[in-house]
Every structure is written in structure tokens, then in C-alpha cells.
Image (cartoon, grey):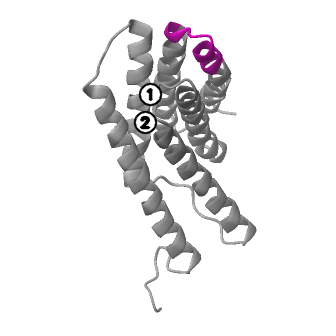
Amino acid sequence: MTIPNLITVLRFVLVPAVVLAMLNMRWDWAFAGFLVAGISDGVDGFIARRFNQHSKLGAYLDPMADKVLLVSVFVVMGFIGQLPLWLVVTMVSRDALIICAVLLSTVMAHPVEMKPLYVSKGQHRRPDRAGAVVLGELALGLHLDPLRPALILLSGVLTVASAAAYLVAWLRHMSGYGEGSTPGS
């Protein structure tokens, strides 16, 4: 168990606290927890790179912690009407499809290497920002009307683009056209 992995586990512990704060309309606490989780994500990555504390467990735990937090925040925000349901459904569906694809690949003895695609890295950060903007609005009593709809739309577009990119990569992988091979070889 490395220091980055311990920090990641603490991010998992933050999730129920953030969700509970949101459900109790304690936006200040929810926003603080969300920010602490985001900062700790950067800290554990820095420590892993700087002190060569990468681990196979961390490669799985880190994105899981991010997803659990994001999905939880988005579902609650959709439930209480702070985010449009189409965005929540799109994001949750994308993540569910990726999980199903990874599980199916593993069951079929053709496991997929866990690495984010370029478009997914962009997609991952936009919902963070959209979630942070909405939580920040609620916690600080702000009204960022032009920014909020733009971030929501951008998050939706990038989520769909990311899902399509993952689907193409997975189909190539499953059909034997993975890295190092070309179609027809």
C-alpha cells in the first residue's frame, strides 16, 4: 500500500460525505469535499510520479475513485434538479458501457489495458468543472448563468465523443486489430 493509494482510499471515504452534504443542502460542505477530492487526486498523482510510487492497484483505484465521486455528484445533482437529466444519463451510461466492455473483454480472456484515451482525459475534466461550477454556485450563492449552460453542453458533447472513441477502440481490440497489428493481417 503506497501513499498515493492511501490518498485515493481517502477519496473514496469523501464520497458519502459529499453526497450526504448535498442531500442536506449543505453546499458549502459538499463543495469543500469536492475540492479536497480534486486536490487529493492531483497530490496522489504527483507523489506517484515524483517518488516512483506507481502501483497496479493504484492504476485501478485512482480512476475508480474519480468515477465514484463524479457519478455520485452528478446523480444527486440530477435528482435535485441542478443538472439536466440528459447529461446525468449520458455520463452514467458512458461509464456503465465502459465497465461492461472491460468486464466482457476480461471474461472472454481478451482483457483491455486500462489507459484513458486523449478525448476521455478532456471529457473527464469537463464534468469536474461543471460539477465544481454548480457546487460553487450553490455554496457561494453565485449565478454564473452564461458559464453553467456552456459547461453542461460541453460536458455532454465530450461525454458522447469519449463514449464513441472508447467504443471504436474496444471494437478494434476485440476484433484483433489492437496495437501493433493492422486490419487484414
Q: Is-magenta flag for residue 22?
A: yes
Query: Percent position (x, y) of residue 28?
Result: 49, 8
Q: Is residue 84 above or below residue 22?
A: below
Provide the residue designation for mark 2. Answer: 127
Query: Percent position (x, y) of residue 57?
Result: 66, 44
Q: Is-magenta flag for residue 170?
A: no
Amino acid type at circle 2 is Pro
Amino acid type at circle 1 is Gly
Provide the residue designation for mark 1. Answer: 131
Q: Is residue 63 above or below residue 174?
A: above
Q: Nearer the viewer, residue 35 or 71?
A: 71
Q: Residue at x 46, y 34 (%)?
A: 84
Q: Residue at x 44, y 27 (%)?
A: 131
Name the secondary structure under disc 1. Answer: helix
Name the secondary structure under disc 2. Answer: helix
Snapshot quadrant of residue 105:
bottom right
Query: Percent position (x, y) of residue 166?
Result: 48, 61
Q: Residue at x 52, y 39 (%)?
A: 88
Query: Percent position (x, y) of residue 73?
Result: 55, 28
Q: Nearer the viewer, residue 70 or 147?
A: 147
Snapshot quadrant of residue 152:
top left
Q: Nearer the viewer, residue 3 or 21?
A: 21
Q: Is residue 183 above or below residue 18?
A: below
Specify start and end residues of the magenta stretch as a single range.
Answer: 17-28
Distance from the alpha carbon under mark 1 to that under mark 2 = 6 Å
For disc 1, the neighbor class at 10 Å (few under 14, some 14 to 19, many from 20) is: many
**Magenta span: helix, strand or loop, mainly?**
helix
How many tags in the picture? 2
Q: Nearer the viewer, residue 103 or 52?
A: 103
Residue 71 visible here: yes
Residue 54 visible here: no
